[in-house]
Amino acid sequence: MKIGIIGCAGRMGKTLVQEISATKGCKVSGGVERSGSPDVGRDIGENSGIGRLGIKISGNIEQLVKDSDAVIDFTSPESTVKVATLASKYKKIHIIGTTGLSEKDKESIKKSAKSATIVMAPNMSIGVNLLASLVEKVASILDESYDIEIVEMHHNRKVDAPSGTALALGNAAAAGRKVKLADVADKVRDGHTGARKKGEIGFAVLRGGDVVGDHTVMFATEGERIELIHKASSRAVFAKGAVRAALWANNKKPGLYSMKDVIGKF
Ligand code: NAD
């Protein structure tokens, strides 16, 4: 399978070059970076620390989509919406790891999925997807006397907050309680906020150092607290999940899929 990498010089992009090159049946078809990036023209393998692959990083997204069976995209919302449109034009597979997408972005991606096979997930690791199904289960068992709080920590260069994963875990908890996250989420607490509202799902965000991604979901009540924790120590877990999603998507009908579809039920 020929896999192209959008944003191939980013933190996830470099990890993807390593992962695709190491996966049987997969081949790096190329990689793109934003135009004007100093990485354009460099060898994609050397740039990712695995030695020369003889493929130059380009600035031409459309050509890469045309030349690939699938493209994997961990970039920015603006770029991802554009790539989805191209994946739709050429009827290709588009694996989306980008977070911070607005409702409008998601609507546009949904439209592209009429002709493209798209797998989109704010977290591609098996562990986090298992955590989400555990959170949904626990939330369905415990009533509102258990306060749900979600704490996440990431490296100091992350640009969106709360993380896409924290929001996905919030959605899983809300689904377990049969409510909408938008109706119960409390993402900002500052000043004289008053007491915590019953049924609320609270978020706390920490940023610092080189943390790849830590998430804790707490269920706290009088006298006890349950904590479900996931800690990623390597970006390779996300890259492995993304490559698995690309292989799974091969020969699937166009549509918008999630990691739940890729992994199957836990
Ligand atoms: P990063 O800033 O290191 O890398 C992003 C790369 O995309 C950069 O090299 C940038 O130049 C490139 N880029 C941006 N716009 C582009 C365009 N129009 N054309 C070509 N290249 C473009 O960031 P990162 O840490 O690799 O994370 C990227 C995204 O992936 C973020 O949204 C992050 O939250 C998300 N992420 C998701 C998962 C997951 O499992 N789903 C895991 C880790 C990170």
Image (tube, grey):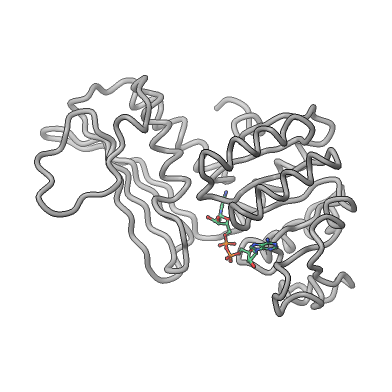
Above or below, 189 against 19 in this view is above
Residue 153 spot, x, y in % from top left: 38, 57
Residue at x 41%, y 45% (from the top left corner)? 166
User: Residue 60 lies in what quarter of the image?
Assistant: bottom right
User: Residue 245 lies in what quarter of the image?
Assistant: top right
Quarter of the figure with the C terminus: top right
In this orientation, which residue lies closer to the viewer: 174 or 40?
40
Q: Quadrant of ligand 1?
A: bottom right
In the picture, measured across the screen, residue 119 lies left or right of residue 123, that is: right
Residue at x 27%, y 41% (from the top left corner)? 186
Above or below, 26 against 38 in this view is above
Residue at x 84%, y 32% (from the top left corner)? 251
In the picture, measured across the screen, residue 185 lies left or right of residue 123, that is: left
In this orientation, which residue lies closer to the viewer: 142 or 3?
3
Residue 88 spot, x, y in % from top left: 79, 39
In the picture, measured across the screen, residue 149 lies left or right of residue 245, that is: left
Residue 7 spot, x, y in % from top left: 69, 62
Above or below, 244 against 208 in this view is above
Residue 8 spot, x, y in % from top left: 71, 64
